Image (cartoon, grey):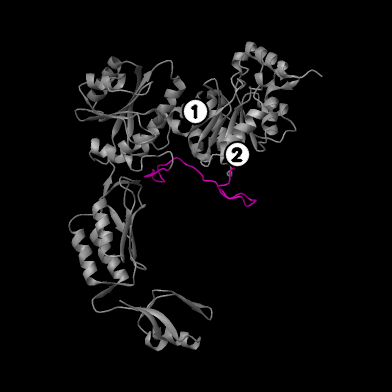
Amino acid sequence: MKFGPRLLNDCGGKILAHSVKVSGRRFSKGICLKDEDIAYLRASGISELVIAEAEPGDIHEDDVANRLAKALAPHGVSLTIAATGRVNLKVDDTSLIEVCSERLTAFNLIDEGLTCATVQHHQLLSAGQMVATLKIVPYFLPLKIVEAAEKLLATGPLFTCHCLTGSDAGLIQTVSPAVKQTVRDSTHKVTEARLSALGCQLTSSIECAHDSAAITAELHIMIDAGIPLILICGASAISDRRDIVPAAVTLAGGYIEQLGLAVDPGNLTMVAAIDDTMVIGMPGCARSPRLNGLDWILHLYLAGLDIDRRALAAMAAGGLLMEIASRPLPRALAPEYAPAKDSKDGVPDHAPYLAGLILAAGQSRRMGSENKLLMKLDGVPLIRHTAMTLLAAGCEDITIVTGYDAEAVRAALENLDVRFVQAHDYAKGQGHSLGAGVLALPEKVTDVLVMLGDMPLISTDLVSQLMAHHLRQSDHDGIISFPVCDGRRGHPVIWGRRFFDELATLSGDSGGRVLLADYAHALRPFSWDRPEMFLDADTQDAFARIKQAYEATQTPS
């Protein structure tokens, strides 16, 4: 290809290399200059242009792109028509993409003017999403380069699309006092939704004792019913091949392919099989809809790909999902999440903005006939003490989640600069209230301090120092901060924005505690020397202790 400046009279029929705007008209780069274009440019005072011109054996960029795209496109892919040397390739159906990285690298090494980029290996795409883009950089490529690319493509594809096939599935949850029924109910719903999004149907869901023999019996029942995919969510994490869940699989005649996964969250995942039945021991994080190692194993299984130790080990590259969701779920399958936008005052979305969230929706059943939040300490309702503590600590954006006795709670906070949101499912547990509060946060919020409404002993100093501790972390929007005294975790807890979508989907009475074990690497404890963060006013006895402790801190007038 010839390239460079030419006198205008010598530019007819050649490619304009750089855009030109004259006399209100724009001539875009890449166009083939016609006689009328030359005349217009001459009349506008242009005497010279930078042009590109084919040499013998050169092929135009669009012709190269169309030609090579047809050669590299596997089954299940649609092509756009080449424009400016580019063809985009999109999947026809929900597909898992298998990238041949060595062949893709070799393709891009043929010539710098020939480029192809794909999504990541084993990324799941929904119908219509782009899997690859082919771009020819110069306006022309020599025929020998095109032929070299075609020769390479004849040896095999750069990538392959594996459509997902649906499957019936079964879920076994084990029961122990450590896992409440509300948590198991939520796990059922999350698992059913996860499978449904992948074209699967949860045809059997049972609960049994946290015992190897009981699990083995349920495995046999599901296998006899012809269920090809069985998920087991144990009451405790699987920590050894001799643990209860792996032992049950072995008793049922199966084998453990691997215990432990190089994906976080999802490390404590078990991959096993009983004859032709796939058995997966779920990690605790799979109780949440957030992307985790279980999703990747399901993708491989439903795509019909091998799930051996090599395939599982390959998940390590990009497997740190907490920091960045590499190989994320397709838009159609991911939980809905609205990223923060710029605020009206011009503060960019990445500027730290910490808000407070006070949970005040509970029914106060253990207190008896009184609503604990309205009980008075030094003449002030407990819920007002809590809100005033946050305000005094410098938290200027506070949301109060109400539920039971909402009007009275609002009245107790009269004239304070706070907003309210009603948790309609407050009777189902704290998780619903927390979720309602997170969904109501302003878009600019990057971090939220969650505080219980019945803990008036928490001091302004603790809250202000905890907020400072959290916000001085460079990755504040991806960490969880809380006070610790004598080795015990206390309240309040500050959550970075990366956890908001999971907090918003919580249910039952466990609140955010269910997530802490899944994100141990994101925890940032803050040492505090007073046990003020432990005592809440759940009962009359607890309130009496709070009152005694509060009065002891007051200076006589």
* Residue 213 vertical placement versus 383 (above, below): above
Depth check: give the residue in front, 117 or 531: 531
Residue 191 visible in the snapshot: yes
Q: How dense is the environment of label 2, judged by Cα within 10 Å: few (below 14), some, or many (20 and up)? A: many
Looking at the image, do the residues carrying marks 1 and 2 touch, with CB atoms under 8 Å apart?
Answer: no
Question: What secondary structure is the magenta-colored segment mainly?
Answer: loop
- Pointer 2: what residue? 354
**Mark 1: secondary structure:** loop
Examine the image and state in which quarter residue 426 appears.
top right
**Mark 2: secondary structure:** strand
Q: Position of residue 292 (x, y in %)?
A: 38, 36
- Pointer 1: what residue? 507
Image position of 47 (left or right of 223): right
Residue 75 visible in the snapshot: no
Q: Which residues are magenta?
A: 324-353
Count of marks, rendered view: 2
Is 365 contained in the magenta span?
A: no
Three-letter amino acid code at disc 1?
Ser
